Image: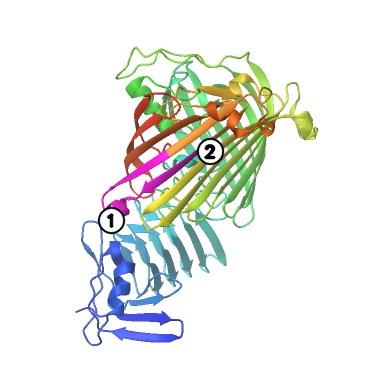
């Protein structure tokens, strides 16, 4: 029988328990291990088994040492090579000494590899952190890296690298709050899809009422396989509605070891929307193909931009000056599988013009933030502009001379007891000066407040908040999760209402309110699908049932 040593580090000393039989399933590893260790009888033999989701045992080497302290999770000390098989989930810390670590499954904890290499294959998921001392890290482009990977070795000279979603690097940092990719707070592939955070990868297929089909076969990045401090990105495709070429090209120069600072410049011809927080482009495309629906308003921008970006821990900021020609996009006769007679919403209307504006963004998240994990994520976007000002005048103007549109989104998760998560989302829109009507904030409709009309309220100010209780799959002992939620919101014209001088009761009747429940399936990082049922609380007998691919709160 394979034997192991259980070393329990206590506050006042060391207790050595050996030869105790214990079979520990991966789902109850820590809880059951504590109980079993406490009942340990000497000279009875020890066998510890980690099982993968299909109940296949995951073998550990004969010389594995398992340690436990009051301040940390269980740690597996392994002398020699070790592999995390596909389908297996490791939630305990691993220390590999004198061997390689190969990852085919999921690592949710910390791994330290001393004197060996780390090989991360396609399909592997790293939610935790990896420290490779004296070895190299080989990572597949198809691996999912949510955590941080630190590599130090002497084979290439003295090398120190940080990569991954939490690295202090501007490469492969995937916070995406822009139109053209998944919005971060939806959590659909938005925290771990490797992408350049200045030049986001464009969806390969987009379908909506303004552009028809947009096919983008080229999404390329050239940087000498990550070794160069210069980065060239190109996203190029074809737009059906006006038979035009669309896309972006961006050239970046990064500085310092971890690329904490960069300068960039680029050209663009693409659609832009202020509604990206409502739902992902993928969802909106499916809504168009299946049901002749489009939940985003958009216009076209063609021009150039240049600016800089800074990365500090979990914070990413960028400031750019943009000079573009803005134009409306028409409405095509959308084809769909169902509801082919649905009346489409008209497009935005304004006279085409040249717009010069400064765009400042700040994206933040705590290290452990995930879809169903405690943490905080936030996005702030400020656009400064004034008609008739050229780029130089914008940069030298007093800020009080400029019009400002500010959009803020925050999400906070708190798992207050194992398996039950409290999730809150707050969205705010603010304006200083004059805002064109087509840039007004809207409240109501899918992705905003369900069971209400699309942009039922419009204004140059808005507030929207939601509170949800989520029962996670491990709490329900099934693959699905269940949530109940309530949300409220209001948009208004600031010149017409001064809420700072009014009692809350005087405008509470204008708040839109919705309550509902959600049943869905998630893989731990993303929502696979969900069914949402919502009811308006301020309108009689208004229900809405939707099929979603992202959380709606």
Label at residue 87: 1
Look at the picture and state if 305 lies above or below 7.
Answer: above
Q: On the rendered structure, is 230 left or right of 180?
A: right
Q: Residue at x 49, y 49 (%)?
A: 225
* Colour convention of the picture: rainbow
Q: Secondary structure at mark 2?
A: loop
Q: Nearer the viewer, residue 96 or 233?
A: 96
Q: Quadrant of the N terminus?
A: bottom left
Q: Residue at x 43, y 56 (%)?
A: 416
Label 2 crowding class (10 Å Cα cut-off): few <14, some 14-19, many 20+? Answer: many
Residue 224: tell me if it is visible. Answer: no
Picture coordinates of residue 18 (x, y %)? 28, 84
Query: Start and end of the magenta stretch?
Result: 465-485
Counting labels gives: 2
Q: On the rendered structure, is 25 left or right of 448?
A: left
Label 1 crowding class (10 Å Cα cut-off): few <14, some 14-19, many 20+? Answer: some
Q: On the rendered structure, is 132 left or right of 441?
A: left
Q: Nearer the viewer, residue 47 or 519?
A: 519
């Amino acid at each position: 029988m394979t034997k192991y040593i259980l070393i329990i580090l206590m506050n006042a000393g060391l207790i050595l328990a050996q030869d105790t039989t214990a079979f520990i399933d991966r789902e109850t590893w820590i809880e059951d291990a504590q109980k079993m260790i406490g009942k340990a009888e000497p000279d009875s033999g020890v066998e510890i088994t980690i099982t993968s989701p299909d109940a296949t045992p995951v073998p550990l080497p004969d010389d594995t040492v398992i340690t436990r302290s009051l301040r940390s999770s269980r740690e597996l000390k392994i002398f020699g090579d070790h592999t995390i098989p596909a389908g297996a989930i490791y939630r305990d810390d691993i220390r590999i000494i004198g061997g390689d670590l190969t990852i085919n499954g999921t690592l949710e904890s910390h791994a330290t590899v001393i004197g060996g290499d780390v090989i991360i294959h396609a399909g592997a998921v790293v939610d935790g952190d990896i420290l490779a001392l004296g070895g190299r890290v080989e990572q597949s482009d198809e691996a999912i890296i949510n955590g941080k990977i630190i590599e130090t070795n002497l084979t290439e000279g003295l090398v120190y690298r940080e990569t991954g979603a939490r690295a202090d690097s501007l490469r492969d940092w995937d916070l995406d709050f822009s139109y053209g990719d998944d919005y971060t707070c939806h959590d659909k592939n938005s925290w771990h899809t490797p992408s350049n955070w200045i030049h986001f990868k464009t969806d390969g297929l987009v379908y909506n009422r303004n552009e028809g089909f947009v096919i983008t076969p080229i999404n390329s990045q050239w940087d000498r396989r990550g070794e160069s401090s210069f980065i060239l990105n190109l996203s190029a495709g074809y737009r059906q509605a006006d038979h035009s070429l669309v896309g972006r090209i961006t050239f970046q120069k990064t500085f310092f070891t971890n690329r904490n600072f960069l300068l960039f410049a680029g050209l663009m011809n693409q659609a832009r929307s202020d509604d990206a927080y409502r739902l992902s482009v993928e969802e909106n495309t499916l809504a168009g193909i299946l049901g002749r629906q489009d939940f985003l308003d958009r216009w076209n921008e063609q021009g150039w931009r240049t600016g800089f970006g800074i990365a500090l821990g979990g914070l990413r900021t960028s400031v750019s000056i943009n000079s573009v020609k803005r134009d409306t996009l028409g409405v095509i006769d959308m084809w769909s599988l169902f509801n082919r007679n649905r009346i489409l919403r008209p497009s935005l209307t304004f006279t085409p013009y040249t717009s010069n504006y400064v765009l400042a963004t700040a994206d933040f998240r705590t290290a452990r933030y995930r879809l169903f994990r405690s943490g905080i994520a936030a996005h702030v976007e400020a656009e400064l502009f004034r008609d008739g000002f050229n780029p130089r005048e914008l940069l030298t103007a007093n800020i009080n001379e400029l019009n400002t549109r500010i959009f803020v989104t925050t999400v906070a998760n708190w798992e207050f007891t194992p398996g039950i998560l409290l999730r809150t989302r707050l969205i705010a829109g603010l304006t200083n000066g004059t805002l064109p009507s087509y840039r007004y904030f809207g409240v109501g409709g899918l992705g905003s407040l369900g069971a209400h009309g699309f942009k039922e309220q419009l204004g140059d100010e808005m507030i929207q908040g939601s509170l949800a209780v989520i029962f996670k799959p491990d709490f329900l002992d099934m693959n699905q999760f269940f949530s109940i939620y309530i949300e409220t919101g209001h948009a208004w014209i600031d010149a017409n209402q001064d809420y700072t001088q009014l009692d809350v009761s005087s405008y509470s009747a204008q708040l839109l309110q919705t309550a509902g429940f959600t049943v869905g399936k998630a893989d731990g990082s993303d929502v696979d699908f969900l069914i949402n049922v919502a009811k308006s609380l301020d309108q009689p007998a208004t229900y809405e049932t939707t099929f979603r691919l992202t959380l709606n709160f």
